[in-house]
Image (cartoon, rainbow, N blue to C red):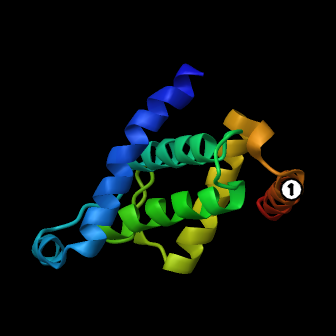
Amino acid sequence: MKFLQLFKILSAPLISSVVLFNTTPGLSTLKAATKTTPATEKDLDFYQKMGVAYVCSASARGNDSDFEKSLNVAANLFTTALEQKHGGFIKEGRKKAQKIEIKNLYSNVLFQLLGGSIKYCGDNVPEAMKKGFKDTLEKRQELNK
């Protein structure tokens, strides 16, 4: 329970910053003049935890938001943060930084956030989405053999 409270507190600054950077033209020109650095594994882990915390708190029993809407909002924020702050570049381990296409990035982020939501707040996740996640995970594991 403390996990959700902590992430409720931390999700507000992330949401505010994404909205601020998307709606303030002066800040985006300033950003364009600065050099972006690729997202590291630590950055990705942070964004994922923030997204899962948002989904879990927004879709908790008693809230008006439904799970799918919360998941899409969190995925949009995650993707926007990667695009705005890191220019869409990701660097994993010792590999060279690579730019991820927005469509691929968004679908991977959705998958990661869904998996995290199943792990941390599985009661909030609709059964059909749990089954879809499990099926997709099995297919991905088959392809990676």
Viewed as shown, does residue 40 lie left or right of 104?
Answer: left
Q: Could you say which is closer to the camera, residue 119 or residue 126?
A: 126
Q: Quadrant of residue 52?
A: top right
Residue at 16 percent across and 68 percent down: it is 35
Residue 53 appears in the picture as rendered: yes
Q: Quadrant of the N terminus?
A: top right
Give above or below for 29 relative to 1. Answer: below
Classify the position of the C terminus by image quarter. bottom right
In this view, 56 is above or below 79: above
Residue type at the position of mark 1: Glu
Q: Where is residue 42 in the image (x, y as percent from the top left)?
A: 40, 42
Give how far across and how far down residue 137 sits, in percent. Answer: 80, 55
Residue 97 visible in image: no
Q: Name the residue under label 1.
A: 138
* Residue pictured at 83% horizontal, 51% vertical: 126
**Which of the 4 quarters of the picture holds residue 99?**
bottom left
Viewer-side residue, 137 vs 122: 122
Residue 39 left/right relative to 111: left
Residue at horizontal 38 percent and vertical 54 percent from the top: 15
